[in-house]
Amino acid sequence: MSRARSHLRAAFFLTAVSPRGATSWIAARRELSARPAPQEPGMEYQDAVRTLNTLQTNASYLEQAKRQRGDPQKQLEAMELYLARSGLQVEDLDRLNIIHITGTKGKGSTCAFTERILRNYGLKTGFFSSPHLVQVRERIRINGQPISPELFTKHFWRLYHRLEETEDSNSCVSMPAYFRFLTLMAFHVFLQEKVDLAVVEVGIGGAYDCTNIVRKPVVCGVASLGIDHISLLGDTVEKIAWQKGGIFKRGVPAFTVLQPDGPLAVLRERAEQTSCPLYLCPPLEALEEGGPPLTLGLEGEHQRSNAALALQLAHCWLQQKDHRGVGEVKASRPSLLRQLPLAPVFQPTPHMRRGLRDTEWPGRTQVLRRGPLTWYLDGAHTSSSVQACVRWFRQALHRCKEPGSGTEVRVLLFNSTGDRDAAALLKLLQPCQFDYAVFCPNLTEVSSTDNADQQNFTVTLDQVLLRCLEHQQHWSRLDEEQACPEPGGPTSLLLAPRPAHSHSTSSLVFSCISQALQWISQGRDPVFQPHSPPRGLFTHPVAGSGANVLREAAAIHVLVTGSLHLVGGVLKLLEPSLSQ
């Protein structure tokens, strides 16, 4: 196994620091290496994941991707080549009943709703999504459950060996990159497992996404659109809509939720170009008329839009297969809204209702109550999704508020990655009136060498730590601006006024998620009980005084947001069963 590597993270340690201490810390930067000598792996799950991680830093692929970024056809041709080398042809994928879903906010939740509804009909389902929270095998699911470590290991090495054996010495890229490899592996798993249908979440893009190699999906969906991944997709929502609409196929029905006029017009144009019938989903309220309200397994008002899209996708597929009990159409909608035909209004069946109610999608509007601590976990990472997160957090706080219940402390745990505008996201979070803002990288422990699922070699340790310090500086500036607000400024997201605390809003940076959680929980979470923190971890004045406040608080509300990878790291520590 000439390419197989095991990777070691250089251990590092960063105590809580204030903005004033940032300069001295930056001066202590050091050289770090993420690629030690090759090592022959065994056939265990962790060995497979470590070898998979070597594809994160496939430099030749990254260079090729930059050249091909403006030409989706070349991207798909490269994917077809990898597919053929793996032993499949594009025609083989036609045997899969694929529901293809894209968007920038809510596509994962829409996939989860759709899969759960259809599984309730007794169908064997496949589900491919990204990113994973705790273990990479979460990305490929059968009947809603991540494939077993044994099944993952078997399929991984079978595909890896096959690609090695078919390597072309003249090719500049011999192995696909991380996400492409997992996409190929998912197709192999779904075919081997003979699933009745597969719900496939598009990666970052649409037109150029490697999942778009699918020629004949049974139905397509577009969740809410917004600004995200601008270096890849474009700097306007219209450009992003053009990319997302690239999954439309001739004659394949597609559904979208209500979008702003600009992106909706682009989606309509893309649909017309490909002769794809595109429908606008009616709101969930229209499907509730004449029946009891629908209960959703995922919290947050914004999930109603995702559920409405999921119902249309499931209903469309069931109709195509002439499945009994698809839901009686209550009204035809021939009229046009914004020049798009409305999807049918139908009565959701008991299977559909139970599917929506029973949907679980960890890390999205998830609440964990642990003694005096309540953890609010949401992987929001775009402006629109963070706004939705703030509304959900505000409503959740309002529901649990008890008069005279004692001192309440609010803590933000935040990180943001890639080319996202962290300052803009943090500004949206300011109205939540946090007492403490905590920043850390998406690293569960100081050293992740024993946990391959959490390793990321696309960035250096220096980069992620410096970014956390930048987040802290953004927050401090916003905090100063909030102390002297402009007259007539926006207040629509503000919570009810709170009594002044004896301490000012403060911010801290920790070197990993575990240390951040140790400080926030102060040993008061009955499940998260780590070993004693490293000596000197809480010696910073803010950390010391804040620890006293947290130990004495009657209620601690912690919002974890900004990155799904951060949420995944937190879940790994708070819910150890997810690592088993």
Image (cartoon, rainbow, N blue to C red):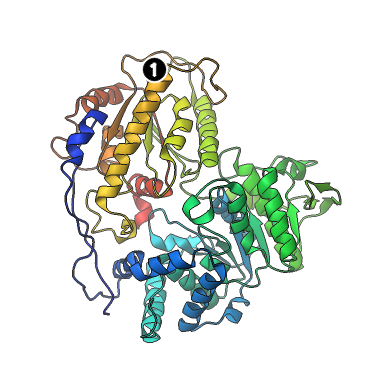
Give the side of residue 140 with respect to residue 536, left or right: right
- The three-letter amino acid code for the residue at tag 1 is Gly
The x and y percentages for residue 324 are 76, 64
The x and y percentages for residue 205 are 54, 59
Query: Along the line of sight, which residue is nearer the eye, 437 or 330?
Result: 437
Can residue 409 be seen here? The reply is: no
Image: 376 above or below 190: above
Give the side of residue 12 with respect to residue 412, left or right: left
Residue that appears at 77% across and 55% down: 327
Image: 374 above or below 207: above
The x and y percentages for residue 369 are 42, 36
Image: 97 above or below 145: below
Q: How many numbered marks appear? A: 1
Task: State which quarter of the image contains the N terminus.
Answer: bottom left
Give the side of residue 202 with respect to residue 565, left or right: right
Residue reaching furthest to the left? 535
Quadrant housing residue 54: bottom left
Residue that appears at 57% across and 47% down: 236
Task: State which quarter of the image contains the C terminus.
Answer: bottom left
Image: 180 above or below 507: below
Quadrant housing residue 180: bottom left
The x and y percentages for residue 142 are 52, 66
Report which residue position mark 1 lands on: 406
Q: Secondary structure at mark 1?
A: loop
Can residue 109 be seen here? The reply is: yes
Say few, some or many: other residues with alpha carbon within 10 Å of mark 1 (under 14 / 14 to 19 / 20 or more).
Answer: few
